[in-house]
Image (cartoon, rainbow, N blue to C red):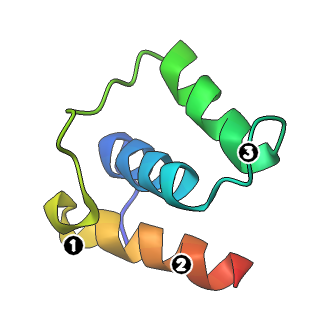
Amino acid sequence: MNFDRWDICEAWWLYARDYHEGQGSWSYDILGRLYRMGYRPPRDFEVEKLTQNGLDIYERLVRATA
């Protein structure tokens, strides 16, 4: 796994979108933080479009909260 800001933002955004527990949850707050950082994913962005590094980050996030 590499440190790549773009991959990290993409993975966290998808994770927060897929697993947030509603407004007020820590994972929902991630979406707001990314938005304030200027991150704007494409409308059709899905897990399948992640790089291998981004997918590794996403999968670690999912496993860590399972």
| Amino acid type of the residue tagged 1 in the rendering | Gln
Looking at the image, which is closer to me, 54 or 42? 42
What is the quadrant of residue 43 in the picture? Answer: top left
Whether residue 63 sits left or right of residue 24 in the image: it is: left
Q: Is residue 11 above or below residue 58?
A: above
| Amino acid type of the residue tagged 3 in the rendering | Gly
What is the quadrant of residue 25 in the picture? Answer: top right
Where's residue 8, x and y in %?
A: 43, 50
Circle 1 SS class? helix
The earlier-in-sequence mark between 3 and 1 is: 3
Q: Residue at x 46, y 78 (%)?
A: 59
Looking at the image, which is closer to me, 31 or 56? 31
The earlier-in-sequence mark between 3 and 2 is: 3
Residue indicated by mark 3: 22
Whether residue 33 sits left or right of residue 49 in the image: it is: right
Circle 3 SS class? loop
User: Which residue is situated farthest in the right direction here?
Assistant: 24
Q: Quadrant of the C terminus?
A: bottom right
Where's residue 2, x and y in %?
A: 36, 64
Whether residue 14 sits left or right of residue 29 in the image: it is: left
Residue indicated by mark 1: 52
| Amino acid type of the residue tagged 2 in the rendering | Arg
Cα–Cα span, label 3 and label 2: 21 Å
Residue indicated by mark 2: 60
